[in-house]
Image: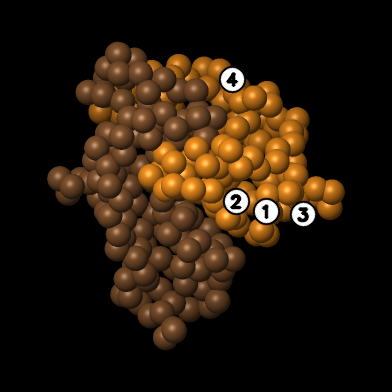
Amino acid sequence: MAPLKQGDVVFDVTRPGATREQLVLFSAGTEDPNPIHVDEAFAKRAGFPTVLQQGPMTTAHLGALLAERFGPRLASLDVTFTAPVFPGEALRLVGKVESAGPEIVLALSVHKPDGTQSARGTATIRA
Amino acid sequence: MNMQLEGKVYPPYRLKPDRALAAKMLAGQGVAGVAAAVPPTYFLFLRGAAHGVDLFADLDIPREKALHAGQRYEWLAPIGWDDEVEVTARIASLAEKQGKGGKLWFADVEYEYRLLPARTLALREITRLVKRS
């Protein structure tokens, strides 16, 4: 495999929108008791139109993509959640090489179908 | 937010990765089957609540006012299914800011995961929580 260079796209994938049942499973799997992910009335009282997809699900998608590509060379992942994600909203996850030196730095972005960025971040890969 | 807790270090607790919980995480992500390896983000702050690290209660962040601003992972050594880790949580920083819609409070909490019995640092996780006014 050719060495990565600045500008290379490492992944550009779209994950289908999660169902409410998936949100329930993810909360169970992460031991997340927050009703905002599973209880419609609670989410509305908190000011949202419906339940919120878990931020760590976005992190988990990115972590899985990075681990699949880089295995134990994956050194770090930093994710900032910039907009809420609701059930049924697909996520486009893009990882692009920002710099390739002694370590590789990737710029990460996550967008919803309407173009809203829901997360951004960086990952570092050991040489 | 309970600003006096900045710098607090919780007593360590122990965790072992659980295949059934990992399978639910994967199912939640839309992936069928079992995880061959422990998912890279399997360990996360939420698992501390059952071990005395309930950030939402301690920091006075009601669930309906809580937002998750972000996460950081630093992987230093692999953690396998049969490994046991010791987890230490520290409230690294707390800050209050004035937002457009009112006050916001920010908490950065750092978790260190050490492989037992050698206590080798294997993973560092930082979670960033926000309390809305």
Residue B80 is left or right of residue B102, and the answer is right
Residue B38, label in figure: 2
Chain under numbered label 4: B
Q: Which residue is mark 3?
A: B120
Q: Secondary structure at mark 3?
A: strand
- The amino acid pointed to by label 4 is Asp
Residue A106 is left or right of residue A76, and the answer is left
**Chain shown in orange:** B
Instruction: List x then y, in percent, for residue B109.
Output: 57, 37
Are circles 4 and 1 on residues that touch, CB within 8 Å? Answer: no
Residue sitting at 64 percent across and 51 percent down?
Answer: B123
Residue sitting at 64 percent across and 40 percent down?
Answer: B18
- The amino acid pointed to by label 3 is Thr
- The amino acid pointed to by label 2 is Val
Q: Quadrant of the N terminus of chain A?
A: bottom left
Chain under numbered label 3: B
Are circles 1 and 3 on residues that touch, CB within 8 Å? Answer: no
> Which-is-in-front pick, marks 4 and 2?
2
Q: Are the residues under marks 1 and 2 on the same chain?
A: yes
Q: Are the residues under marks 3 and 2 on the same chain?
A: yes
Q: Are the residues under marks 4 and 1 on the same chain?
A: yes
Are circles 4 and 3 on residues that touch, CB within 8 Å? Answer: no
Q: Which residue is mark 4?
A: B58
Residue sitting at 70 percent across and 32 percent down?
Answer: B9
Q: Secondary structure at mark 1?
A: loop
Q: Which residue is mark 1?
A: B79
Nearer-the-camera pick, B93 or B51: B51
Residue B100 in sight in this render: yes
Residue B94 in sight in this render: no
- The amino acid pointed to by label 1 is Ile
Chain under numbered label 2: B
